[in-house]
Image (spheres, rainbow, N blue to C red):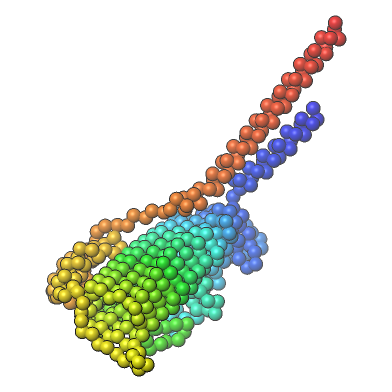
Amino acid sequence: MRRKKTTIVIFSVLILFLFSLTLASALVEPKEGRVVITGEESLASLLKYQGINQLSEPIITKNGDICYLYQPLHVFANSTFRFLGSDCKELRLYSGTYIRISGSAYFSDIKVTSADRNTNQPIIISRATYNQKRPHIYTDEANYVEIKNSEFSYLGSYTAIEGSTWGVSFWHLKSGLVSNSEFHHNYFGIYTWGTKNVTIQSSKFHDNIEYGMDFHDYSNNFVIQGNTVYNNGNHGIIFSKFCDNNKIVDNYVYDHTQGVFVKGVDHDYGVHAIMLHKDSNNNVISGNVLKNNYRAIFLYQSHNNLVEKNIILNDLGDGIYLDNSSHNQIKNNTALNTKGYGLYSFYSDNNEFKDNYFEKGSYFKKAVDGQEQGFVSSEKYVPEIIAAVNQEVNKKIQMKGQDQVLIVNNAGNNNGSKDQNLEQGSIAVTNSGSWNIVTSLSDFIDSKMYNFLAIALIAIIIFLVEVVYKYHKKGRSNRNQIKNRKNVKEEK
């Protein structure tokens, strides 16, 4: 009897222990100057953790729809944090704070910005005050980040800790999605390093001190589609150093004309709409509309890329510039009203040019018999007339789920634009269409796996308890039968 009770107690303790491991809430604890999140948490549940004695200030407070973060957050590996607009419509990060993501994070319908501790207003910096510290968000070997219908502003500043403090940064992120969101007045709009498998679509990047989007070393398998990028202090979109197999399609990139600003230094060379830099190979730049930039497309020491069906308007320099880049395909592009050449090729060989229209012709500079020489080509390639370009753009170009209409040689034709007087080379935008966002099955499995394992473990525990119970019940029945037989024998 004693052994049976002992067995039942052991199994009961085991059940409670496993059950607590399965369904326990996330752990929030202060550690080395930051608040560590393990398990699964959200802003709503974080607001409940205000009784941690080791902290001189609260973790987070809420005033109306606005939440204020006082402490740096670190979402640990294999943990998940949800930043939801249903919990806080706006999250303001006080100076000295940051959000570090080593697990997974979801931002949905929320505005994230910095806040001065005295005024509660965003911390504004400029080229002159570029190194004034501001809060920032970055990943560190994270599994997944998803950003939907959200806004990130007035984040990041320059420090010697490259990249992580520059605004919203993805370091070694395994996969991610950014959709229908806005990044503005940050140090960098968005920055990545060693990141893979990210889609950025239907979003805006503008008025950032340096780059709109800067994808750095070994950032591969990106899809940059249907975004609007404008008025950034450096290039609009750049893949720099060993970035392969990326697609930059159907974006509208404009107004990048000021001198380059890099890490506190102004340079006199201009900024570009789209750039592939130093061994960024096997990429696609297609169907973009690029207007009023210093250069529209710049390939530097990058090879085997496809540049096609792009519309280039009103550049201050050359439309497409190739610098020591080879085996690229330049097809069906149109460059109008550029101050420089439609195409400038500098020591770039074995490239294919087909069916382009360059209004200002092309220039090829290379060494011939050891001497540097230049060759001007007035050939505009095909199509031969601007009307064909106009018809093609009206039929095919789509960005951000909107119909993009190119007006060429039709001054004064408003064609649905907000501008009543359109100049040659202007763009009219009509509102129609939308993007359908489809996440992969693996993302769904990752988000549901925790609950699935919990249910499976509970089922196994229940099964084992039932087996043990039946075993004890059967044993007790057998013992009773033996006892009854013994009693009968004794009576006889």
The picture places residue 450, in percent across and down from the top left corner, at: 55, 48
Please state the total of marks drawn on the protein image: 0
Vertical placement of residue 120 versus 372, above or below: above
The picture places residue 199, in percent across and down from the top left corner, at: 41, 62
Task: Find residue 101 and report its image quarter.
Answer: bottom right
Question: Which residue is outermost to the top?
Answer: 492
Q: Is residue 446 left or right of residue 270?
A: right
Q: Nearer the viewer, residue 347 or 189?
A: 347
Residue found at x 38% / y 53% = 438
Q: Is residue 7 left or right of residue 417?
A: right
Q: Quadrant of the C terminus?
A: top right
Task: Find residue 456 and report its image quarter.
Answer: top right
Residue found at x 44% / y 76% = 279
Residue found at x 46% / y 75% = 241
The picture places residue 416, in percent across and down from the top left corner, at: 18, 65
Q: Is residue 74 left or right of residue 358?
A: right
